[in-house]
Image (spheres, rainbow, N blue to C red):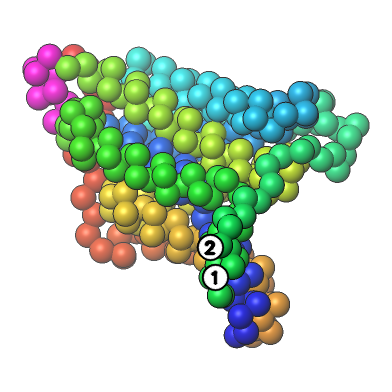
């Protein structure tokens, strides 16, 4: 494998891992607090659509990003109403929200963008880090990416600090393991879980915005194509740890990149269908427990009723 192809493979893997990482880190916060958001896919799709719509109407990628966060936060708020206030089944409500968001974004896209098939929006370009981008082999792959790629490790650091270095993080983790103890201490389990689900919504909105504002500068129906489910699997694959979740997203990014890059490398003995399935096969291994013992938060998916 020559250096040029290695750079392309690495750059593609990192670019594809970034939106997964942003969404998965947000989901990690919720699951630490005891909430499972299967609606993560819907949050990402709403963010992608909101980003495209905001930028399309204003011509500003920044306002598009703000719109993406508002749209994904709205889906997160609905998930919070079902999961926290109504104490509904978190799996059923999450799947229902995914279906609703897919339908709504499809209808809205055809109504708003239908007459402009193939439309493009300004979006965000690549940010080149001077000096570092000139490093041999991996310099261009690591330091010639969109700003979202650089934001992902920053978000990971912030969430790790929140979870393990702050009082709020202690309360959040306790809400996912011993919510009764949190309630008896005087803290609000409901408040902690609301905070967690809204953090998830904003992080998923960032992840969704990557697709429409940084990758292809447009919106297509169902453009996240299951990325939210991969992000959910990354949390399990990473055993509910920040570092493990980041590594899992990178693995999924490499697997997704291979389906596009292996043919360019002259590897043609693997069926194309297998390459397309590869990220989801890895996700299946993660949720099946074959990657090692799993210790989810004890109160995960358990509604809290004071």
User: Relative to residue 256, is residue 261 depicted above or below?
Assistant: below
Q: Residues within 10 Å of mark 1 (few under 14, many from 20)?
A: few
User: Of residues 49 and 100, which is closer to you in this image?
Assistant: 49
**With 181 as the anchor, is 231 left or right in this view?**
right
User: Of residues 304 and 119, which is closer to you in this image?
Assistant: 119
Position of the C terminus, as image quadrant, is top left
What residue is drawn where x is 66% and y is 68%? 260
**Residue 296 in magenta?**
no
Q: Which mark is residue 132?
A: 2
Q: Which mark is residue 227?
A: none
What residue is drawn where x is 36% and y is 16%? 86
What residue is drawn where x is 14% and y is 23%? 182
Q: Position of residue 238 (x, y in %)?
A: 33, 55
Count the marks: 2
User: Relative to residue 158, is residue 281 depicted above or below?
Assistant: below
Give the residue pinned by disc 1.
135
Q: Position of residue 156 (x, y in %)?
A: 38, 45
Whether residue 85 appears in this view of the structure is yes
Q: Are marks 1 and 2 in contact (CB under 8 Å)?
A: yes
């Amino acid at each position: 494998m020559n250096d040029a192809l290695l750079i392309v493979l690495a750059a593609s893997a990192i670019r594809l891992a970034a939106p997964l990482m942003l969404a998965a880190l947000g989901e990690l916060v919720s699951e630490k607090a005891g909430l499972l958001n299967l609606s993560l896919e819907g949050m990402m799709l709403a963010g992608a659509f909101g980003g495209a719509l905001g930028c399309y109407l204003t011509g500003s990628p920044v306002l598009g990003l703000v719109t993406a966060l508002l749209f994904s936060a709205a889906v997160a708020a609905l998930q919070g109403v079902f999961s926290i206030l109504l104490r509904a089944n978190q799996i059923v409500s999450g799947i229902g929200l995914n279906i609703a968001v897919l339908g709504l974004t499809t209808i809205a896209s055809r109504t708003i963008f239908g007459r402009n098939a193939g439309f493009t929006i300004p979006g965000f370009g690549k940010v080149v880090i001077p000096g570092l981008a000139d490093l041999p082999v991996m310099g261009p792959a690591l330091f010639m990416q969109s700003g979202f790629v650089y934001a992902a490790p920053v978000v990971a650091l912030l969430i790790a600090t929140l979870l393990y270095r702050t009082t709020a993080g202690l309360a959040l983790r306790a809400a996912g393991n011993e919510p009764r103890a949190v309630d008896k201490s005087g803290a609000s389990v409901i408040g902690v879980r609301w905070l967690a689900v809204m953090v998830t919504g904003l992080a998923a909105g960032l992840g969704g915005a990557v697709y429409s504002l940084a990758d292809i500068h447009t919106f297509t129906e169902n453009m996240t194509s299951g990325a939210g489910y991969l992000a959910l699997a990354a949390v399990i694959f990473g055993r509910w740890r920040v570092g493990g979740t980041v590594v899992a997203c990178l693995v999924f990014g490499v697997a997704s990149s291979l389906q596009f890059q292996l043919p360019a490398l002259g590897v043609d003995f693997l069926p194309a269908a297998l390459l397309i399935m590869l990220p989801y096969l890895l996700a299946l291994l993660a949720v099946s427990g074959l990657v090692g013992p799993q210790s989810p938060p004890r109160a995960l998916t358990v509604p809290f009723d004071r």
